[in-house]
Image (tube, rainbow, N blue to C red):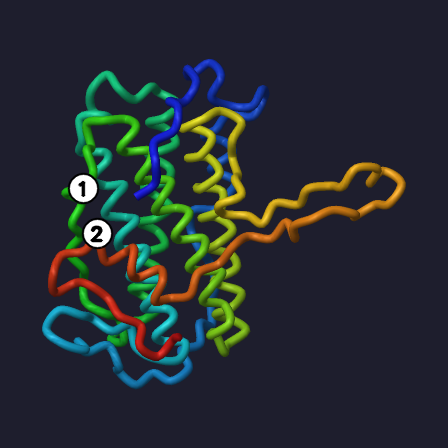
Amino acid sequence: MMTNSPNPTPESAAAPAGVPRRAFLRYTGASVAITGLLLAGCDDDSDDVDANLVDVGADDTGILNYAYALEQLEAAFYAEIKNGAYYKGLGANSAEKQILDDLALHELAHKNFFKAALGNNAIKDLEPDFSAVNFGDKNSVLTNAQAFEDLGVAAYNGAGRFIKSPTNLALAGKIVSVEARHAALIRDLRQYNNFVGSDVVDLFIPTAGSESTPGAGTGTGKERSKRPQEVLNTANQFLKAGSKLSARSFS
């Protein structure tokens, strides 16, 4: 689990000047409007590997089920936040509630999109286990929100290499860009003006005197990625027995 960091700044300092957070989130596009989704290898390979693991399947269907599983988890997490004491009580200010409302809508839209696209090839509805999260405590809520969002971005980036259909690859790119905006906002809520870190991006650091040599420095500036099984090792900690996942076709 991620370590705690300082509490976010007051609401008055929470958003960049002239750019309301709610408006910013609206421009990320909560709904995904891509037609012609191609499911390569649509054989139903979503049966349980054993009594405790649900395998996502193979080929593009498996990757879309993998994404669907993660979106199920995120949608359930934000729904639980809105039922918790931090959101309902005096802990969350109006700016934070607006952000959490929008993120909840985004994740629900992603979840429903994948479920409809997969149809009969979709894995079952998963049962989350959020017993490790204190939904009455601001730091616990935002720390875990950051963990989920960072995990989602790394998961999409790591899964791209397995996608065969250009349409599905474009779909993943559109969704991961929204997830990255979520991750940046949650980080900024936890610590103002701290929207990215070296744990998620191989930060580019210019070398001394780089003004005369543009591009000189260390680091690629690219987002870090994680392969499916590494992602599921974390995600499974938030799923009940019988809903824990495997991705045996994607190593």
The answer to whether residue 90 is left or right of residue 14 is left
- Which mark, by number, is residue 132? 1
Mark 1 Cα-neighbour bin, 10 Å: few <14, some 14–19, many ≥20: few
Nearest the eye: 63 or 211:
211
Residue type at the position of mark 2: Phe
Q: Quadrant of the N terminus?
A: top left
The answer to whether residue 216 is left or right of residue 137 is right
Q: Residue 146: where, in percent of width, then height?
A: 38, 40
Q: Residue at x 20, y 32 (%)?
A: 135
Residue under label 2, please give it. Answer: 238
Q: Residue 182: where, in percent of width, then height?
A: 44, 41
The answer to whether residue 35 is left or right of residue 206 is left
Q: Residue at x 29, y 64 (%)?
A: 115
Q: Quadrant of the C terminus?
A: bottom left
Cβ atoms at labels 2 and 1 below 8 Å apart: yes
Q: Residue 229: where, in percent of width, then height?
A: 34, 67
Q: Is residue 212 above or below residue 98?
A: below
* Residue at the far right in the pictured view: 212
Q: Residue at x 34, y 31 (%)?
A: 4
Dot placed on the residue nearer the N-terminal end, 2 or 1: 1
